[in-house]
Amino acid sequence: MRVFIGIRPEREALTRLEEEASPLRRDFPQFKWVDPGNRHLTLRFLGEMSTADAEKLCSRLKSSLPPSTAIPLEIYGLGGFPNPSSPRVIWAGIRNSPALTNLFNHLEEILESLGIPRETRRFHPHITLARIRRGQPAPRRIAARLRSASDQIAAFRAKAVTVFKSVLLPEGPRYSILEEISLDAT
């Protein structure tokens, strides 16, 4: 099964994010837009895992991510990978914070203890909004539209870390929750 670890934003933050993304969805149909209910902050994509390994991962996370306090997060601005002028992916940024960096680093230590190598790419917290459809060129006018997005779109509290199972379907991925580990002891 395909597995990744992420954070699900609160409903109000997702609603505000959709309000910001909706005009782009209308004006740039060459992108395949992520269903608002599937939007998340990926902490780590793990790829294919056996059921036994996924269960071991969930168990280790439950015992190693002690509840403390929910992490305040801020969705700010829009951008694109590999660059805003010719994006293949459109994203909403998540302002990094010491608490989020600590969570990511702690997660990396847990994964390494399970024999999963550390991520080699720099952590760039974001929520994927859309991917360019296969064979479509990136629109030229999109960079200005991304730059004109609100600086602060929404704020929310990360109350849990979620282990997701991802099934790829022709209509788009379907995510299901394997485990949700609370971060909020209050």
Image (cartoon, rainbow, N blue to C red):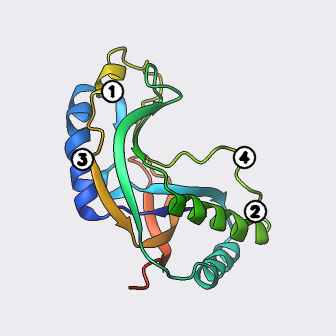
Q: Please provide percent x and percent y for residue 79.
A: 41, 33
Labels 4 and 1: the sequence-earlier one:
4
**Rendered residue at 36%/66% (across/down):** 157
Q: Quadrant of the C terminus?
A: bottom left
What residue did someone put label 4 on?
Answer: 120
**Rendered residue at 36%/21% (across/down):** 143
Can the viewer see residue 156 in this picture? Answer: yes
Q: Which residue type carries mark 4?
A: Thr
Specify whether 47 is left or right of 23: right
Q: Which residue is situated farthest in the front direction here?
A: 98
What residue did someone put label 1 on?
Answer: 147
What residue did someone put label 2 on?
Answer: 116
Between disc 4 and disc 2, the foreground one is 4
Q: Please provide percent x and percent y for residue 166.
A: 51, 60
Mark carried by residue 52? none
Between disc 4 and disc 3, the foreground one is 4
- Per the image, label 1 sits on a secondary structure element best described as helix
Q: Which residue type carries mark 1?
A: Arg
- Near mark 3 (Cα within 10 A), the count class, few <14, some 14-19 or many ≥20, is some
- Near mark 4 (Cα within 10 A), the count class, few <14, some 14-19 or many ≥20, is few
Mark carried by residue 18? 3
Q: Please provide percent x and percent y for residue 125.
A: 50, 49
Q: Quadrant of residue 112?
A: bottom right
Q: Quadrant of the N terminus?
A: bottom right
